[in-house]
Amino acid sequence: MSISIIIDLLFDIAGEIIGHFIPDLSPKSKFEKHIIRLKEEAWFSSMEKDYRYSYIIYQNSRVKRFLSSEKNVKMIISMDEEKERFINLVIEEHVKFTRLR
């Protein structure tokens, strides 16, 4: 494990502790920051407003992990091919979720 990963993990833990005791001072997670940025994109905003995909975006661990990476978010914003791959990921996870019921 690299030192930067450990430092990021410690900051995330500290943020969670602060957020637990003083919710108004808690820093936003990488995921939350990336969601705010992605909401500026029309395609993402419409996908997020669709109740079928909104749940997957906010609750599916695979999608959340993907959106927590700044590299991934930059790629889906700047590259149409990566955007399509992300959209397909959300759709596939939705299909898996609905099959479980």
Image (cartoon, rainbow, N blue to C red):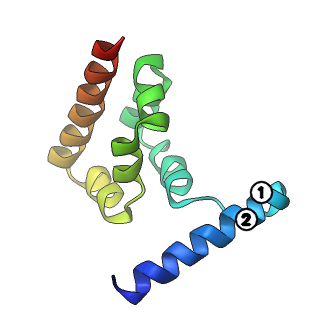
Amino acid type at mark 2: Ile
Q: Is residue 24 visible?
A: yes
Q: Amino acid at mark 1?
A: His
Label 2: few (<14), some (14–19) or many (≥20) C-alpha neighbours in 10 Å: few
Name the one closer to the observer, 10 or 43: 10
Q: Quadrant of the N terminus?
A: bottom left
Secondary-structure class at tag 1: helix
Is 33 or 2 nearer to us in this picture? 2
Can you identify the residue that label 2 sits on?
17
Q: Which residue is rendered at x = 55% and y = 49% of the image?
A: 36
Q: Residue at x 47, y 27 (%)?
A: 54
23 relative to 31 in the view: left or right? right
User: So how many labels did they put on this image?
Assistant: 2
Q: Residue 79: x, y in percent?
A: 21, 52
* C-alpha span from label 2 to label 1: 5 Å
The disc label shown at residue 20, or none: 1
Residue 44, above or below 50? below
